[in-house]
Amino acid sequence: MTDTENETTDEEQEGPLEPGDPGAPVDRVNLGASIRAMRKRIGITQEGLADRLGVHTTFVGRLERGERGAQWRTVRRVLRALELTPADFASTLEQIESEPQVQPRGRAASRKAR
């Protein structure tokens, strides 16, 4: 056997991560809601954030609605654009995750019902 065949990942040794564990994946909807809350808190528009990031406003909208996920480097870019720290993000995300989930209304609800 080679050395690489003997290696196991941290996940195999300790089991899968649970939501809320450090390093666990963040739900797209909660990520987007957190970004929206932080953006609104400092008083800039989606267009303003898009300009700061150098992206189109549709990217910001899809990110905030949870239609698009984001890698950690994208989250860091958003935080820098909003002049916030990872601790600010974690605090906002924790608050969002502790709130009861709201059912979508309007077109989003009708699309999910199909």
Image (tube, grey):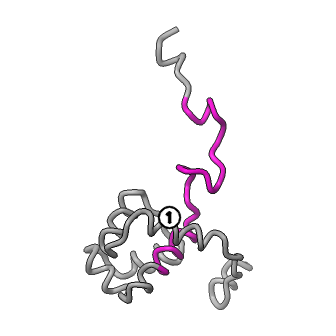
Query: Which is more toward the observer, 62 or 71?
Result: 71
Query: Which is more toward the observer, 43 or 70?
Result: 43
Residue drawn at the location 71% of the way across and 81% of the way down: 103
Residue drawn at the location 31% of the way across and 68% of the way down: 80
x, y (%) of residue 106? Answer: 65, 91
Residue drawn at the location 67% of the way across and 83% of the way down: 104
- In this view, 66 is above or below 76: below
Residue 28 included in the magenta stretch of the image: yes
The span shown in magenta is 9-37
- In which quadrant of the rendered view does residue 88 lie? bottom left
The C terminus, quarter of image: bottom right
Q: Residues within 10 Å of mark 1 (few under 14, many from 20)?
A: few
- In this view, 85 is above or below 33: above
In the picture, measured across the screen, residue 11 lies left or right of residue 114, that is left
Q: Which residue is mark 1?
A: 90
Q: Going by the picture, which residue comes out furthest to the right?
A: 113
x, y (%) of residue 10? Answer: 56, 33
- In this view, 18 is above or below 85: above
Residue 65 included in the magenta stretch of the image: no
- Residue type, mark 1 in image: Ala
- In this view, 24 is above or below 97: above
SS under mark 1: helix
